[in-house]
Amino acid sequence: MGNGIYVAMSGAVAQDRALDVVANNVANARTTGYRAERIAFNEVLNEKGQLSYVQADRTAMDDTHGALVATDNAMDLALEGDGWFSIQTPQGTRYTRDGAFSLDADGILVDGSGNSVRGAGGAEILVPPDAAYVSIDSEGNVYADEDPVGQIEVVRFDDKQLTREGANLFRASGRPVRDELPAVVSGYLESSNFDTIRGMVDLVRISRTYESLHRMIENYREIDQRTARDIGGPR
């Protein structure tokens, strides 16, 4: 079997991985605070250094900020700058840009999955049931009427410290970086930073490339089968 089929197969595998990444981005184009994934390709030489293959080397988070959209809900929050909200989950502390928060039946500030939003030092933020209104300032201080009830924990990490998990959450390794924290903006949500139009164009391009490589693989197989018949046939 010729080397060409292996080169085509490596390209098809890489394009299949790229298709998965872009399809996931498109599916989350309307997810609040979603950070798109970008895939990087790498050229790999064979053992003799005479033939190069392609592989999907890694994915990285696109740290571009999404647009802020007004909601007029005081507990909808966005971050103006680099940073993350801290969420307490059953698996431990996780981080998100999705600030669509609300109060649960006990008056605890929670995310869309019911996980509590961490206050400074890891405490829950509890709003008394008789509070007439809730307000949140640019430093994340939460007020029930005029009384402070906690401060939302906002942190910053180097992007390389973050690992994507489900439900729009990230796991962090190491300590947060000690840089200036972003401002908390109440009454706004951050939209996804993924461009849907670009995503659809990428899906078409990747699909066509994958189909072309698949046709190449089939052509190589036909050539190999024909060659085998010719060599093994009657003389």
Image (tube, grey):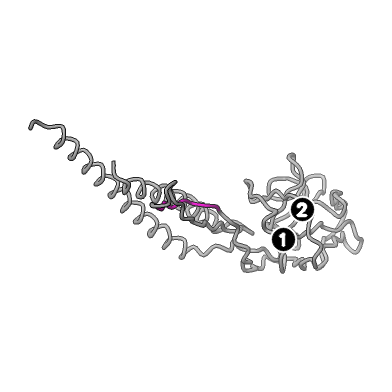
Q: CA distance from mark 2 to mark 1?
A: 15 Å
Pointer 2 local density, CA inside 10 Å: few below 14, some 14–19, many at least 20: many
Q: Which residue is mark 1?
A: 76
> What's under tag 1, amino acid-wise?
Asp
Q: What residue is drawn where x is 84% and y is 49%?
A: 124
Dot 2 corresponds to which residue? 86
Residue at 15% across, 32% down: 232
**Eyeballing the image, is 110 above or below 158?**
above
Left or right, 102 with reference to 132:
left
Residue 229 percent across, percent down from the top left: 16, 35
Q: Measuring from the top left, give residue 133's x and y in whole percent.
A: 83, 61
Identify residue type, mark 2. Ser
Q: 147 and 22: which one is in front? A: 22
Could you say which quadrant of the image residue 201 lies in?
A: bottom left
In contact (CB < 8 Å): disc 2 and disc 1 = no
Mark 2 or mark 1: name the one nearer the start of the chain: 1
- Rendered view: 159 above or below 3: below
Within 10 Å of the Cα at label 1, are there few (<14), some (14-19), or many (20+) other Cα atoms?
A: many
Camera-near label (2 vs 1) is 2
- Give how far across and how far down residue 110 sits, in percent: 76, 50
Q: Nearer the viewer, residue 164 or 78?
A: 164
Residue 223 appears in which quarter of the rendering?
top left
The range drawn in magenta is: 52-58
- Figure quadrant of the C terminus: top left
